[in-house]
Amino acid sequence: MSLFGSVAPPRFLPDTDARAFVLDGFAELGPRLGSSARMPHLLSDPSALLGRSRPANDLDSLFDMICAIQEVIGQREVELTLVEIDPRNPAPLPEQGLVHLGDPGGKLFHPLRNSASPEGEYLVLYTATAFRVRALMLAGIARALGHIALDRASIQPDPDALDQWDADAELAAVLLGMGIWVANGSYMFENACCGGGCGVDLKSIRSGLSMPEACFALAVDGQRKGLRRRAVAKHLEPTQRAALEQSWKVASDVPAALAIGRGSEARALGR
């Protein structure tokens, strides 16, 4: 017998409205993102896509890694330029032709579209701070590529609801196979904590989805794609893993309209 009695585990399942938001978002975004959102894959370690053991730590390795990710998520033909900025002394950007994809505030990576280019070129601004915490870097990349995916699908933000567009970008990232990164990053964003000593001002960084919402979205996506819970959970940090397990049971009742073939053989990339 416990001296203090039984203690209920923390509840990480998002409320009914939040779950409806995720399901509605998947139902709307999935068909518009095309075949890439139906591929049964899960990205975990992007370094493995390049046959490297070390994570990206400079402009060149970051660019190579993002290009490898784009190959997997259906953005192979997207021309992308990375530009490092110093928040303390930002260099001016050319104003003509560049369109911000959402609000640049509170982001380690921020994409812009070059409207003057008929091929649809994009510019992604990033700060070197992103290299300090791998989970934050991957979450930032996932959201930036999610924004680009929305833009390429002609899904434009509502100027009065830019926070929702950030959430949609993260849902798009989950659908494209980057849900592990979204979920692991969401906990740090939500709690403004990276474990201490990382030197990142997390209080100034925002996320689109809360940690429970991100883990529920990952659980739904896993169910849609025929992934096994353990195959997904092993890539998550402990708190996110507990949240995924709570959501997985609920996600098993995901509407059939969202399914893309239960039991299909899923490919785990970058294990």
Image (cartoon, rainbow, N blue to C red):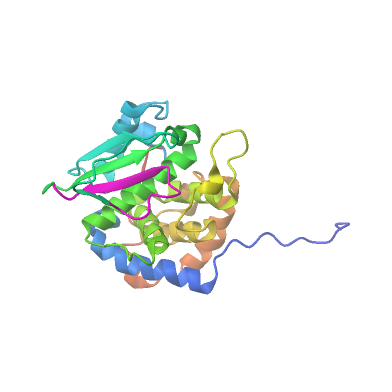
Magenta stretch holds residue 55: no
Q: Quadrant of residue 38?
A: bottom left
Q: Is residue 253 visible?
A: no
The range drawn in magenta is: 100-116
**In the rendered picture of this protein, how many numbered marks are placed on residues?**
0
User: What residue is drawn where x is 31% and y is 46%?
Assistant: 111
Q: Is residue 151 visible?
A: yes
Q: Position of residue 208 (x, y in %)?
A: 44, 57
198 left or right, relative to 216: right
Q: Position of residue 129 (x, y in %)?
A: 46, 34
Look at the picture and state if 77 lies above or below 91. below
Q: Quadrant of residue 34?
A: bottom left
**Which of 36 and 266 lies nearest the eye of the viewer?**
36
The residue furthest left is 118
User: What residue is drawn where x is 63% and y is 36%?
Assistant: 196
Q: Quadrant of residue 60?
A: top left
Q: Quadrant of the C terminus?
A: top left
User: What residue is drawn where x is 25% and y is 37%?
Assistant: 81
The residue furthest right is 3
Q: Quadrant of the N terminus?
A: bottom right
Q: Position of residue 260 (x, y in %)?
A: 31, 62
Q: Position of residue 18 (x, y in %)?
A: 49, 69
**Which of 229 and 163 lies nearest the eye of the viewer?**
163
User: What residue is drawn where x is 79% and y is 61%?
Assistant: 6
